[in-house]
């Protein structure tokens, strides 16, 4: 699992059918760190600190073992300070 912060929504209207209408969000692990795209399984907004899972756990959390995700948000952190 990773702790990441949601930066913004990623709008992608042309995508494979299997992605359905699940939101895609841009997240980062730390300030200045690389950005990643995560499937939002819980309803996040920009600025939220979240818990993300990767690999097969990401596909399962997104809804199916066949789902095309390698990073899925599974929780919103209530209290967190990056320091």
Image (spheres, rainbow, N blue to C red):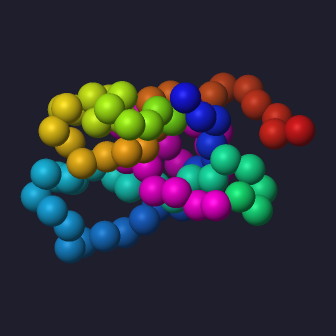
Estimate the x, y position of residue 15 in percent, counting from the top left.
20, 67
In the image, what residue occupies the spot 28% across and 36% down?
Answer: 59
| Residue 66 in view here | yes
* 46 magenta-colored: yes
Q: How many marks?
A: 0
Q: Which residues are magenta?
A: 34-51
Give the quarter of the figure containing the N terminus: top right
- Image quadrant containing the C terminus: top right
Where is residue 66? Give x, y as percent.
16, 39
Q: Of residues 45 and 60, which is closer to you in this image?
A: 60
Residue 76 position by quadrant: top right
6 to 59, vertically: above or below: below
* Magenta region includes residue 56: no
Most distant residue in the bottom direction:
14
Residue 46 in view: no
In the image: residue 67, left or right of residue 47? left
Q: Position of residue 32 (x, y in %)?
A: 76, 62
Residue drawn at 64 percent across, 35 percent down: 3
When asked about the image quadrant of residue 7, the answer is bottom right
Task: Give coordinates of residue 82: x percent, y percent.
Answer: 81, 39
Q: Is residue 78 left or right of residue 71?
A: right
At x 34%, y 52%, the residue is 23
């Amino acid at each position: 699992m990773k702790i990441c912060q949601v930066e913004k929504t990623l709008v992608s209207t042309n995508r494979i059918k299997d992605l359905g209408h699940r939101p895609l969000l841009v997240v980062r692990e730390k300030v200045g760190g690389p950005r990643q795209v995560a499937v939002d399984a819980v309803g996040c907004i920009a600025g939220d600190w979240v818990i993300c899972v990767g690999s097969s756990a990401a596909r399962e959390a997104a809804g199916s073992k066949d789902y095309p995700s390698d990073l899925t948000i599974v929780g919103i952190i209530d209290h967190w300070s990056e320091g």
